[in-house]
């Protein structure tokens, strides 16, 4: 019975991790940016969604939608206000641009965290479940909300796959992650590709944030941890590889769930971190990494 | 060595330090305390700048090294009662070992991987300390039975002397042959390798130097404050402050990092009335500096002098 519960809980949290990690790795793959404000974007979506759902009484579904929109907006702001100006800056030598983008997004993430803490305080909040009620799966009582979250995550992942593999814009995105210069030679505007990439990122992070609020609850203290989880997963899976991130998300999600259930909830993040250290020592490009 | 003493910047800095040494005679103990903390932060930032400004490696977890030094010293003192200097040396040594363990695999990685590994190291240390709370005091931190001094003036002078010594050593290093090779390795590794320099070995040396200074400074901070806790020596927020200080002061100048740290801590103190928005404003200003003045305070000052 415990195993079934671990299986189900692990699946739900892994799906959520996967959603966050895929966005993170997508932005890295396409525009070479490690967005250290990732946790901030997710928490903005989560807290906005919560505020609108409970405080302003818009109800859970509408709140969720607006939350996702808020995530999208903060993704755009991150791109236009922080990432792009640094990338285009003439005062920074090009070898150091990456470092400055990293530091810039880190600072932006802190600004988001402190700004949100000022507006909302750092108490954890939970969204009301999208669908309330409990289902019995093989004898294990599972909230329907949890199942819905896993399903939603996979719908979004499926839509993303369809987009990248079946539409022209999506294929341009894939091409940009492999060879941006080649893409421009074919006549594609890179700035439009980046716009699409950041849009997708905003939606992914927004949905992940809002669903996280609904599943586990979120507070501004989670910002750093969320960014850390996302890039741990992404490094494990291989920077730039979406399927790698998917795999790694499940590995990490299940590792954490197993640890929480079988050892103790307090040591929950440890095995994943140790695995990360091991991977970095032995196979730094992760499971399916390219570089 | 000659290069070192020819440097005008160093003499200016020493003059400023001499003036700073007179401050305890007309500043309150509270202000002295802030400056003392700022001086230790200055050493953290200078050690970081050696790695970043010169070796070109972004260490997102300087607090890994600082925390190792701090907690080693604290645990040894609390459990075995060694004298303070021995504990500090032990802290520096453990930080060195930790730095080696971290750098050896990390330096094989290119680009963002190195930064990520350093960040992960901090998380690991943080989690380990929380988990082994019996020995380390967990998130609350631990008290240390010995303190360097209870007088604010003595602590101030110790911190100032420490800062000056570290500054001279690190600045001298940056102006030495090793420093030049590091600069070359950081800015153009291929060119440096083509000239026959073992880039990885030099970066490793830089990392070790940074580790030793960070560890010793961390240990000294513990014996100043009398406590060691995650929030003061390990938290990622502390690491970010160190990075901001170094970038604010001007990367690749060493002395700029110390300046940046002092400015940052003093400014944070002035912003204290803002309450929670304190960190927000500091981060916002740092972001603005990165966007508009990436060379930092000292960097811009030096550039201005070059152009006249």
Image (spheres, helix red, strand yellow):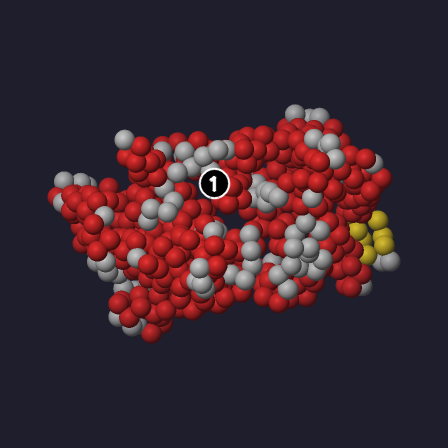
- Give the vertical position of B95 relative to A164 (above or below): below
Q: Is residue B191 left or right of residue A241?
A: left
How far from the left and from the top, in percent, is residue A74? 61, 32
Residue A215 appears in the figure: no
Kindly indicate the quadrant of the structure image that contains residue B305: top left
Q: Quadrant of the N terminus of chain A?
A: bottom right
How far from the left and from the top, in percent, is residue B288? 44, 32
- Give the vertical position of B18 relative to B148 (above or below): above
Residue B183 appears in the figure: yes
Q: Is residue A137 left or right of residue B220?
A: right
Question: Which residue shows up at 45% across the image and 50% down it?
Answer: B187
Please name the residue that numbered disc 1 is placed on.
Answer: A93
Q: Quadrant of the C terminus of chain A?
A: bottom right
Single out the residue that lies furthest toward the right: A138
Question: Which residue shows up at 64% across the image and 45% down it?
Answer: A28
Question: Which residue shows up at 59% across the image and 45% down it?
Answer: A34
Depth check: give the residue in front, B156 or A142.
B156
How far from the left and from the top, in percent, is residue A124? 59, 42
Single out the residue that lies furthest toward the bottom: B80
Mark 1: which secondary structure? loop
Depth check: give the residue in front, B75 or B86.
B86
How far from the left and from the top, in percent, is residue A154? 80, 45
Question: Which residue shows up at 39% across the image and 57% down it?
Answer: B181
């Amino acid at each position: 019975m415990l195993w079934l519960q671990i299986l189900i809980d692990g699946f739900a949290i892994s799906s959520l991790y996967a959603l966050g990690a895929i966005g993170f790795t997508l932005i890295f793959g396409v525009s070479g940016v490690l967005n250290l404000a990732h946790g901030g974007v997710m928490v903005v979506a989560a807290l906005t969604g919560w505020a609108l759902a409970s405080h302003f009484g818009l109800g859970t579904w509408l709140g969720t939608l607006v939350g996702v929109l808020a995530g999208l907006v903060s993704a755009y702001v991150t791109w236009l206000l922080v990432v792009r100006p640094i990338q285009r800056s003439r005062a920074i030598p090009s070898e150091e641009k990456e470092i400055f983008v990293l530091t810039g997004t880190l600072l932006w993430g802190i600004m988001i965290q402190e700004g949100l803490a000022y507006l909302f305080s750092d108490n954890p909040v939970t969204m009301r479940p999208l669908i309330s009620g409990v289902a019995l799966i093989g004898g294990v009582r599972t909230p329907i909300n949890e199942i819905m979250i896993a399903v939603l995550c996979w719908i979004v992942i499926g839509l993303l796959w369809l987009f990248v593999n079946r539409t022209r814009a999506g294929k341009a995105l894939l091409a940009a992650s492999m060879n941006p210069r080649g893409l421009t030679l074919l006549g594609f505007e890179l700035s439009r590709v980046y716009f699409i990439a950041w849009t997708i990122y905003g939606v992914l992070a927004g949905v992940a944030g809002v669903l996280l609020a609904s599943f586990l609850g979120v507070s501004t203290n989670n910002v750093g941890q969320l960014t850390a989880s996302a890039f741990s997963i992404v490094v494990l899976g291989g920077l730039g590889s979406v399927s790698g991130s998917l795999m790694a998300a499940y590995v990490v999600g299940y590792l954490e769930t197993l640890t929480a259930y079988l050892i103790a909830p307090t040591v929950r993040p440890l095995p994943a971190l140790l695995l990360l250290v091991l991977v970095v020592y032995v196979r730094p490009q992760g499971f399916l990494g390219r570089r | 060595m000659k290069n070192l003493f020819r440097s005008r910047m160093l003499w200016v800095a020493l003059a400023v330090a001499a003036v700073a040494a007179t401050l305890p005679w007309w500043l309150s103990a509270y202000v002295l305390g802030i400056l003392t903390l700022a001086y230790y932060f200055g050493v953290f930032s200078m050690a970081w700048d050696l790695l970043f400004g010169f070796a070109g490696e972004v260490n997102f977890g300087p607090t890994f090294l600082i925390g190792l030094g701090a907690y080693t010293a604290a645990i040894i003192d609390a459990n075995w009662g060694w004298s303070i200097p021995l504990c500090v040396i032990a802290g520096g040594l453990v930080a060195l070992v930790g730095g080696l363990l971290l750098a050896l695999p990390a330096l094989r990685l290119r680009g963002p991987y190195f930064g990520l590994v350093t960040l992960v190291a901090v998380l690991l240390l943080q989690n380990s300390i929380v988990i082994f709370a019996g020995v380390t005091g967990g998130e609350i931190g631990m008290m240390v039975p010995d303190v360097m001094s209870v007088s604010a003036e003595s602590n101030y002078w110790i911190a100032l002397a420490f800062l000056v010594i570290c500054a001279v050593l690190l600045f001298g290093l940056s102006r030495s042959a090793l420093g030049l090779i590091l600069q070359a390795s950081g800015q153009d590794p291929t060119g440096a390798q083509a000239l026959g320099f073992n880039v990885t070995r030099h970066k490793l040396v830089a990392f070790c130097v940074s580790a030793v200074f960070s560890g010793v400074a961390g240990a000294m901070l513990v014996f100043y404050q009398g406590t060691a806790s995650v929030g003061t020596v390990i938290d990622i927020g502390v690491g970010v402050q160190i990075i901001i200080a170094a970038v604010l002061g001007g990367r690749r100048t060493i002395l700029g990092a110390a300046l940046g740290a002092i400015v940052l801590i003093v400014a944070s103190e002035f912003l204290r009335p803002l309450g929670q928005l304190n960190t927000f404003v500091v981060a916002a200003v740092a972001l603005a500096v990165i966007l508009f003045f990436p060379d930092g305070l000292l960097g811009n000052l030096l550039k201005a002098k070059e152009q006249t």
